[in-house]
Amino acid sequence: MNEQFSIKGKVAVITGAGGVLGGSIAGSFIEAGARVAALDIRPEQLEARVAELTAGGGEAIGIVGNVLDVASLEKVAADVVAKWGRVDILLNIAGGNTPGGTLAPDAEFFDMPVAEWEKVTNLNMNGTVYPSMVFGRVMARQKSGVIINVSSMAAYSAITRVPGYSAAKSAVANFTQWLATEMAMKYGEGVRVNAIAPGFFIGDQNRAVLINPDGSLTDRSKKVLAKTPMGRFGDIAELNGAVQFLCSPAAGFITGAVLPVDGGFSAFSGV
Ligand SMILES: NC(=O)c1ccc[n+]([C@@H]2O[C@H](COP(=O)([O-])OP(=O)(O)OC[C@H]3O[C@@H](n4cnc5c(N)ncnc54)[C@H](OP(=O)(O)O)[C@@H]3O)[C@@H](O)[C@H]2O)c1
């Protein structure tokens, strides 16, 4: 591959690497020759992921950690720096909607359980901010590094029934711009911060709302596809190239951007 797009040898910390998107991106990073520190909250899924990543000779380690616990993240950062000497890339992938964060079709917003709102906004907003504080410090001292956050279509315009997830993903988009500005102005152009905004991909978190048990599309799914000019769901692997590009020297003048990977969903008014 053209050197400009290479991430070979880079040290990448990937939160949520045990999950669907994180696993796919981690696999593509290994294929591209990066070294991967896979972070996730549950040891079982992490062990399976690391076995997969290292099966072909890739360099990967698994670290159990919680993106909402700054002390645990500081320990992870110290371990990664002790092993590989630096952190070049942070992918803040951990996040997602929570079952309690979705309002039932007939539920009223006024009755929304506050604890569920706090849970989903905490994971999606602070779960991006806290790792950025910890690993961003390492990058600022190195004067180089790239942070990639994950926003959502819910940040562009309203998606019904998921108020907390939507608010938090809007916050992620805004935080991406804020941190990009802060890093460039205080620590120089070597530290860049961008985000991707995935459209609709079938993952563990949304399968039940998009696909009926018999495999047919739900009504919600049909609405999504009607507003997606390409008329299909994304393939998880279609996020990999966008992330790698943003992490590579080819994106050297790109910071504070939120890149939709959405088959045109965010571009289309629906009319
Ligand atoms: N799938 C889509 O269509 C889509 C669209 C737009 C945006 N996204 C975003 O993409 C990201 C990944 O989505 P996904 O579908 O890959 O989700 P996923 O499969 O659930 O992966 C998320 C991973 O993060 C872990 N995690 C949860 N809380 C954590 C914590 N406090 N600390 C560390 N790890 C934690 C999860 O563990 P548990 O399984 O134990 O919770 C899971 O392994 C999310 O930010 C999501 O909002 C997804």
Image (cartoon, helix red, strand yellow):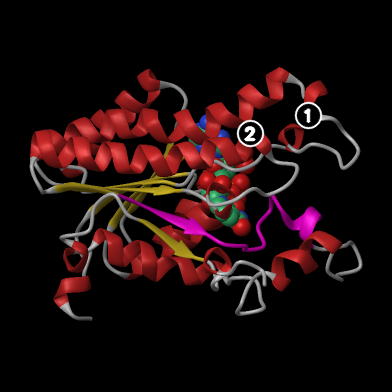
Quadrant of the image for the N terminus?
bottom left
Percent coordinates x, y for residue 208 in the rendering: 80, 54
- Is 235 left, or right, of 50 in this rendering? right
Which residue is at 60% across, 41% downward?
A: 166
The amino acid on which the numbered mark 1 sits, given as a three-letter code, is Phe
Residue 163 lies in the magenta stretch: no
Q: Which of the numbered marks, if any, corresponds to residue 164?
A: 2
Query: Residue at the spot x=33%, y=31% of the render?
Result: 76
- The residue carrying mark 1 is 109
* Mark before the other along the chain sequence, 1 or 2: 1
Look at the picture and state if 58 lies above or below 113. Answer: below
**Disc 2 marks which amino acid?**
Gly
Does residue 33 show up? yes
Q: Which residues are magenta?
A: 194-210
Q: Residue at x 66, y 69 (%)?
A: 270
Q: Residues within 10 Å of mark 1 (few under 14, many from 20)?
A: few
Q: In the rendering, at what x and y percent does residue 133 appear?
A: 29, 28
Is residue 47 or residue 18 the one in the foreground? 18
Q: Residues within 10 Å of mark 2 (few under 14, many from 20)?
A: many
174 left or right, relative to 238: left
* Image position of 142 (left or right of 205): left
Q: Position of residue 82 (x, y in %)?
A: 19, 34
